[in-house]
């Protein structure tokens, strides 16, 4: 597969009045989130209407720059916009079965520590978009968002607003709330450096990870839910069982790679704050409104799935208590995008597939769950050290439920 850049520009909101915009504060969770670019790639069939110059012009966004890790300003700085041509069809791309190729479809390398690579981070764009047009006419929209100011919920809100604008229905847009997050979770005037150092250590490790996509179909999810049922959790959710199953299998591969030596394992599940807070303003708020619910076990791979699900649920209860009112061991990150991006329709129809990333910078032992077909199918983008991934790909207990999608075509695409 070859990709050729045909256009690269900085799109600025020349048609939007900026005089009334004042700098707004970031929230506390933004302050301790590192400067890095998560990515998502949304794939569409060949659109009924021709792709045209109006697309970048509809990207009228007041994208500022973070200042002093405390506020956002310079709203006329603009965003990065790229168009590229791909010399194969969507089907041919999917049949390559090379997850790492996803990184070619986004403006910035995903999930690396930008402080190490970019020097002066306050001039970095807050977002970037790359439109990749395949030989068949299909489109992959690659999105890079600076995690310092936005989480997946923020990105989804922005993309839905952009799509609504492009379809010609700007009156239906729900304007983003830029200030509520910092009111509810105010930033520290002087954040101690140790907090940023701690989160950087969690996020970035000096090893080379690899990412693979594993598919869990409806039958696999149903079977895992049966295995996970217990008196304490009689109806575990798909997210519960996949989170714990992947945690269990990842821990087993880590033990195998270290000659059977087992260490305490801590699983950090990303918990979304917006639906847990009684605040209408937060629903449309921009910012990192999430935190981590920590569940720990000394021998994860030896514990029954139902017991891990109970441990997970208990950790979520403690997180709720934190909202109302240093760990040791091996850390595993798991987040669920749910169906955040499956409804982003620019007039080309709904997405046929959503991908996360190819190579996750320096982020290690991490999983992104992406739901499809109304949650009946879930794809897990798992990132591990290369030797650990090789062990996972050969683990019969894992492969009894997970598939590398042997047809080479994402399940949601193959059914259309």
Image: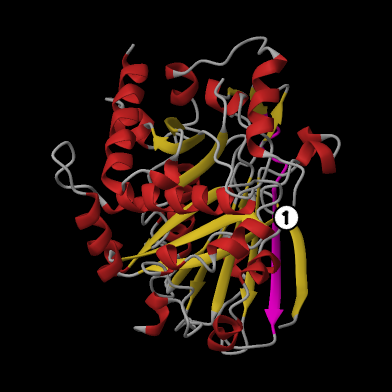
Query: Residue drawn 32% across and 50% down?
Result: 239
Please state, as top left, top right, bottom left or bottom right, where the C terminus lies in the image: bottom left
Please state, as top left, top right, bottom left or bottom right, where the N terminus lies in the image: bottom right
Q: Position of residue 231 (x, y in %)?
A: 13, 39
- Residue receiving disc 1: 109
The front one of 379 and 309 is 309
Inspect this view and state whether residue 41 appears: no
Question: How many numbered discs?
Answer: 1
Q: Is residue 46 above or below residue 204?
A: below
| Residue 74 painted magenta | yes
Query: Residue drawn 60% across and 12% down?
Result: 188
Extreme-front residue of the structure: 260
Q: Is residue 280 above or below residue 183?
A: below
Q: Position of residue 191 (x, y in %)?
A: 66, 13
Position of 286 with respect to 80 (left or right) is left
Extreme-right residue of the structure: 119
Figure quadrant of residue 140: bottom right
Q: Is residue 262 above or below residue 20?
A: below
Are there few (<14), some (14-19), or many (20+) residues within 10 Å of tag 1? many
Q: Position of residue 319 (x, y in %)?
A: 36, 24
Magenta residues: mostly which secondary structure? strand
Inspect this view and state whether residue 109 appears: yes
Q: Secondary structure at mark 1?
A: loop
Query: Residue drawn 59% across and 43% down?
Result: 261
Figure quadrant of residue 164: bottom left
The front one of 298 and 243 is 298
The front one of 299 and 100 is 299
Position of 320 with respect to 71 (left or right) is left
| Residue 2 painted magenta | no
Magenta-tinted stretch: 73-86
The front one of 391 and 14 is 391
Q: Position of residue 15 (x, y in %)?
A: 61, 49
């Amino acid at each position: 597969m070859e990709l050729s850049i045909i256009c690269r520009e900085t799109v600025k909101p020349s048609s939007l009045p900026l005089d009334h915009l004042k700098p707004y504060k970031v929230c506390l969770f933004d302050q301790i989130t590192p400067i890095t670019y998560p990515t998502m790639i949304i794939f569409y069939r060949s659109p009924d209407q021709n792709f045209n110059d109006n697309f970048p012009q509809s990207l009228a966004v007041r994208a500022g720059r973070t200042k002093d890790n405390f506020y956002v300003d310079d709203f006329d700085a603009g965003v990065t916009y790229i168009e590229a041509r791909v010399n194969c069809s969507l089907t041919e791309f999917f049949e390559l079965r090379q997850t790492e190729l996803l990184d070619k479809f986004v403006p910035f390398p995903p999930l690396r520590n930008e402080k190490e690579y970019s020097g002066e981070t306050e001039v970095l764009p807050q977002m970037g978009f790359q439109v990749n047009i395949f030989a068949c006419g299909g489109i992959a929209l690659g999105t890079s968002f600076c995690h310092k100011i936005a989480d997946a919920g923020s990105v989804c809100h922005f993309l839905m607003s952009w799509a609504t604008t492009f379809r010609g229905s700007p009156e239906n847009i729900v304007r983003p709330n830029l200030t509520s997050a910092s009111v509810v979770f105010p930033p520290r005037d002087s954040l101690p450096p140790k907090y940023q150092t701690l989160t950087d250590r969690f996020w970035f490790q000096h090893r080379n990870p690899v990412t693979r996509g594993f598919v869990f179909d409806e039958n696999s999810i149903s079977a895992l839910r049966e295995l996970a049922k217990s008196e304490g959790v009689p109806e575990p959710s798909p997210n519960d069982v996949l989170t714990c199953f992947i945690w269990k299998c990842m821990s087993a591969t880590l033990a195998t790679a270290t000659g059977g030596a087992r260490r305490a394992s801590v699983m950090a599940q990303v918990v979304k704050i917006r639906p847990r807070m009684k605040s209408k303003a937060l629903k449309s708020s921009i910012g990192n409104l999430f935190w981590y619910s920590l569940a720990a076990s000394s021998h994860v791979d030896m514990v029954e799935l139902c017991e891990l699900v109970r441990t997970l649920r208990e950790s979520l209860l403690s997180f709720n208590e934190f909202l109302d009112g240093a760990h040791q061991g091996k850390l595993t990150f798991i987040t669920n995008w749910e169906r955040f991006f499956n409804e982003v329709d620019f007039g080309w129809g709904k997405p046929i597939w959503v991908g996360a990333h190819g190579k996750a910078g320096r982020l290690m032992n991490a999983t992104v769950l992406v739901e499809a077909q109304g949650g009946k199918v879930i794809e897990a983008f798992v990132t591990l050290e290369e030797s650990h991934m090789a062990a996972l790909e050969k683990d019969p207990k894992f492969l009894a439920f997970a598939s590398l999608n042997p047809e080479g075509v994402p399940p949601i695409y193959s059914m259309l």
